Amino acid sequence: MSAAISKSLESGLAGRQLSFRYDRKLPWLFRGLDISIAPGEAVGLTGPSGAGKSTLAQILAGFIKPLSGSLMFNDKPLPQKGFSPVQYIYQHPQLAVNPRWTGGQIVAEAFQPSEELLDMLEISADWLNRYPHELSGGELQRMAVARALGPETKCLLADELSAMLDPLTQALIWRTLINYKNKGLSLLVISHDRHLMTKVCDRMLPLKRFDQP
Amino acid sequence: MAEYLLEVEHLALNFYRHKGFAGQESLSPVVDLSLKLMAGEILAVVGSSGSGKSLLASAVLGILPGNCREQGLIKYRGQVLTKILRQSLRGSDIRLIPQSVSYLNPLYTIGWQLKQAALAAGVTPALVRTEITEAITRYELPESTLKLFPHQLSGGMARRVLTATATMGSPRLLIADEPTTGLDEDLITESLKFLKTLADDGCGILIITHDLSAVTDFADYVTVFIDGLSVETCQTETVVQQGWTTLKHPYSRALWRSLPVMDFWDGLPENSGRHSHGCPFASRCEGCQDLCLAHHPNISNTNEREYVRCHF
């Protein structure tokens, strides 16, 4: 750990001097990028398609290792094993669930969500017996949200979370998430919907496309 | 009377699956859907998730799984769409822009998949190359995309590739299932504008979407679905000019009102928890009466195209 990082003691999720590109021949997605999300804060990540928004979120979730820079949660690196306090929700829920599991198995993968949480997200009991291909995108996405909102979750990375949802369900999910945010959950919001971002985010972080190799 | 390009009348879908040793149980995600589309028109289908929007697309293309039974009528240019007809029309006359990026084959490059789409669309082999180049420039995809595999694309790029595959050659009926999710605003306008030019050339377009704000600018009509029931069809022009309060069904009004640009979660209808055998919106409707819980409302037409399905 470098001296500069150990000096700044802060809670929440913090990425310092992050750089990443998929291949040496490809341009940088970002270089020396700093990002921090405090508990109870919602940060909006904006930028054109292909700018690296999802990649950055996956780095913050610990799915991808940055080529340089560090990632800290409450001044400690993310745990390598067990439940991570930082949870990532995919843009496409179909790709984030086991196709051979029923809805009930999917939502209870990490913890048993309370009836109250399922009600808040309006997940009806009979979806829990269905398999992913028998559920609509919006239904699956609500299950993915329920699955990620465990008691140990401190930070949620919402990658186009509500892009597949109708406006009513979208409003419902965001009301639930903002409820959790007010109790201290950190949020990173990726969305192309300007109006949604201004309603749910406390501040915005624009991500530009680096075009020089 | 003018001929409709696509007519769906009282479509119902039942899925059967085994239960126990010899038992069967059924699911009915689509109860009663009706819509009409003329050539050169854009019809938007909006509604709650799981309301059967994507199933409607699969039904028209004839790609529903084998355990599904269909009731009602689907007509294409006045002809009843039979199983064989659907098979011969899909990919050439009738195209789909699928919702999920998992429709791309993960084992082949984008270039190969675009080529197959062009050939299926009836593009002559000699012209395939130019057609592909045109398609990728239209969606601002770099030439290098052709060598990539689906997992190497961003969400927005994959969507553009799917759109490119469906718009090769000259489709007559295009079903776009959520064509705008995951795209930034410029690209949304760009791709909807392109759909508009297709419509101006005489192609009928069915857009299945959640993005009401985009719809109102481009579509001629909008049909609202809830839980497998089509509850309202109206002209978008009236909604644009006079606002969401002109909508007749309480569900359509709630849908518009909950847009982030409108009231968002402030206007969310509360769920009374009452079980309904009738109108699917009854448990959340302010004007709900006993009649709504007991019976499905029938369609009442305002004119030949516009209708509402509400007891009141």
Image (cartoon, coloured by chain):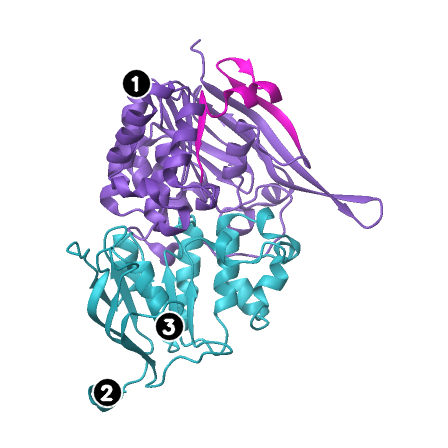
- Residue A181: image tag: 3
What is the secondary structure assignment of the residue under circle 1? loop
Looking at the image, residue A102 sits to the left or right of residue A78; the answer is right
**Quarter location, residue B109:** top left
Point out the stretch of residues depicted in magenta. Answer: B69-98
Q: Is residue A132 magenta?
A: no
Quadrant placement of the N terminus of chain A: bottom left
Crowdedness near tag 2: few (<14), some (14–19) or many (≥20) residues, C-alpha within 10 Å: few
The residue mark sitting in front, 2 or 1, is: 2
Image location of residue A85, percent across then percent down: 43, 77
Outermost residue to the right: B21
Relative to A86, is B147 above or below?
above
Chain that is coloured purple in the picture: B
Q: Is residue B97 magenta?
A: yes
Q: Residues within 10 Å of mark 3 (few under 14, many from 20)?
A: many
For residue B237, say whether it is visible: no
Residue nearest the viewer, comparing A79 with B44: A79
Q: Secondary structure at mark 3?
A: helix
Residue type for callout 1? Asp
Above or below, comparing residue A51 to residue B237 in the picture: below
Q: Gap in Å between the C-alphas at discs 3 and 1?
A: 49 Å
Disc marking residue A2: 2
Residue B138, quarter of picture: top left
Q: Quadrant for the C terminus of chain A, please.
A: bottom left
Amino acid of disc 3: Lys
Q: Which amino acid lies under the numbered mark 2 shown in the image of this protein?
A: Ser
Q: CB of mark 3 within 8 Å of CB of mark 2? A: no
